[in-house]
Image (tube, rainbow, N blue to C red):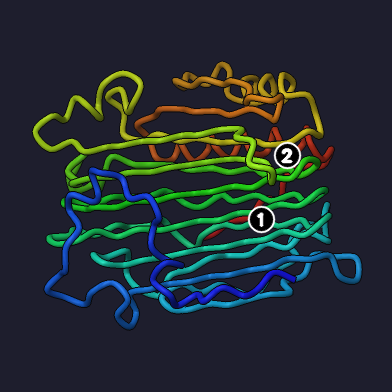
C-alpha cells in the first residue's frame, strides 16, 4: 500500500509549476492567506469493487470541500457509484487552494460531478487554484463531469488536472468554461484564467496535453479570437480515453451526436489510439449543457451498451 501523503503540507496543495501569468499576481493578501483555516480544501477518495458494486473505501475531506455519500442510482448499472462533490462556501476566493484526488481500482465504476457551477470571485491580491488528480486502473470506468466554471470580474484562477489511465481503463472527462457572469454583462472581465490538462499512462506516456492561458487585460482579442472563444460565451470540452472501442469509432460517435444541431464543434482522435475528444463553442448555456450531455450519453451507450441515467440536479 502506498504511503499516505501529508495532505496538510503546502507542497501537497500547491501547484508545482505555476503559470507565469498567475505567478505574476501572487502575493500575500490582506485577508486570510493560503494555508489559513478554511482556505485549503482537500478531497482524497478511493473506490474499489466490494460485494459486487463500487464502494468508497477511502475518504479524506477537509472543508470547504466535501462530498455526499455515494449513491447507486443507475438501474442499468446498479454497481456504479455516483458521487457529488461540493464546496461549503459561496465560491472560490483569493488565496483558496483546493486539491481533489480520486483513485478507481480495477473494475470500479464511478461518476463524479459537482453540486453546482464553480464561481470564482474577484481577487485583488494573490490567486486561487485547484489541483485535480484522477487515476483509473485496468477495467475501471471513471467519469468526471463537473458543472461550468464561471470567472467573475477580476478573478485570478489556475486549475491543473492530471489524469492517469491504465491500459484497459476508461476515463470520460468534461469541462465547460464561461466568459463570465453573462447576466451582469461581464464577458472576459477576469484577470487571468489558466488551465492545464495532462492525460497519461502509468508509465508516463502522454496521451493528451491541453493548456489554456486566458488573460484578456488590454488585449481582449487574445481570448475572443479564433482558436479560443471565437466570439462565443461558452467553451466546452469532452475527453474520452478508452480502448473499449477503436478511437475512430469513438470520434465518429461524438461527431454524429452533435451533427445537424447547428453547433460549432470539432472532434479528433487522441494519440496512441487512446480515444477521442470533442470541443464546442456556443452562446447559450442551456444549449452548451445539452450538447455536452448528448455527447456523453452517446459515448456511454457506445462503450457500455447501456444508456446513461437521467440524473437531474434541480
Q: Which residue is mark 1?
A: 111
**Residue 256 in picture, x, y percent from top left:** 65, 20
Picture layout, residue 118 above or below residue 207: below
- Closer-to-camera residue (150/226): 226
Where the N terminus falls, by quadrant? bottom right
Q: Is residue 250 left or right of residue 98?
A: right
**Residue 308 in picture, x, y percent from top left:** 72, 45
Question: To which quarter of the image does residue 72 belong?
Answer: bottom right
**Residue 131 in picture, x, y percent from top left:** 45, 57
Mark identifier at residue 147: none
Residue drawn 73% across and 43% down?
170
Q: Which residue is mark 2?
A: 300
**Residue 124 in picture, x, y percent from top left:** 12, 60
Q: Secondary structure at mark 1?
A: strand
Q: Is residue 158 left or right of residue 115?
A: left
- Closer-to-camera residue (49/29): 29
Q: Mark 1 vs mark 2: which is more N-terminal?
A: 1
Residue drawn 18% across and 46% down?
191
Q: Pointer 1 and pointer 2: residues touching (CB < 8 Å)?
A: no
Picture layout, residue 197 above or below residue 253: below
Label 2 packing within 10 angstroms: few (<14), some (14-19), many (20+):
some
Q: Secondary structure at mark 2?
A: helix
Residue drawn 8% across and 33% down?
218
Amino acid at each position: 500500500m502506498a504511503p499516505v501523503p501529508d495532505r496538510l503540507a503546502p507542497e501537497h496543495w500547491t501547484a508545482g509549476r505555476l503559470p507565469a501569468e498567475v505567478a505574476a499576481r501572487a502575493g500575500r493578501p490582506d485577508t486570510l492567506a493560503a494555508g489559513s483555516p478554511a482556505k485549503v480544501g482537500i478531497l482524497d477518495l478511493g473506490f474499489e469493487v466490494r460485494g459486487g458494486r463500487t464502494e468508497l473505501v477511502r475518504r479524506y475531506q477537509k472543508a470547504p470541500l466535501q462530498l455526499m455519500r455515494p449513491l447507486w442510482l443507475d438501474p442499468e448499472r446498479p454497481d456504479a457509484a455516483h458521487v457529488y462533490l461540493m464546496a461549503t462556501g459561496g465560491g472560490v476566493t483569493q488565496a483558496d487552494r483546493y486539491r481533489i484526488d480520486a483513485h478507481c481500482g480495477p473494475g470500479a465504476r464511478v461518476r463524479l460531478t459537482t453540486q453546482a457551477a464553480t464561481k470564482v470571485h474577484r481577487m485583488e491580491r494573490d490567486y486561487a487554484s485547484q489541483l485535480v488528480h484522477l487515476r483509473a486502473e485496468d477495467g475501471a470506468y471513471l467519469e468526471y463531469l463537473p458543472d461550468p466554471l464561471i470567472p467573475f470580474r477580476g478573478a485570478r484562477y489556475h486549475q491543473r488536472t492530471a489524469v492517469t489511465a491504465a491500459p484497459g481503463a476508461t476515463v470520460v472527462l468534461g469541462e465547460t468554461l464561461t466568459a463570465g457572469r453573462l447576466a451582469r454583462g461581464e464577458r472576459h472581465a477576469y484577470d487571468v484564467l489558466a488551465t492545464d490538462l495532462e492525460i497519461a499512462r502509468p508509465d508516463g506516456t502522454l496521451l493528451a496535453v491541453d493548456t489554456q492561458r486566458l488573460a484578456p487585460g488590454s488585449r481582449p482579442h487574445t481570448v475572443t479570437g479564433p482558436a479560443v472563444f471565437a466570439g462565443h460565451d461558452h467553451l466546452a470540452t469532452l475527453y474520452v480515453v478508452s480502448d473499449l472501442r477503436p478511437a475512430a469509432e469513438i470520434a465518429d460517435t461524438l461527431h454524429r451526436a452533435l451533427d445537424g444541431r447547428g453547433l460549432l464543434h470539432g472532434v479528433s482522435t487522441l494519440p496512441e489510439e487512446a480515444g477521442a475528444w470533442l470541443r464546442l463553442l456556443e452562446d447559450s448555456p442551456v444549449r452548451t449543457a445539452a450538447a455536452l450531455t448528448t455527447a456523453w450519453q452517446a459515448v456511454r451507450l457506445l462503450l457500455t451498451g447501456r444508456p446513461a441515467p437521467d440524473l437531474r440536479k434541480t
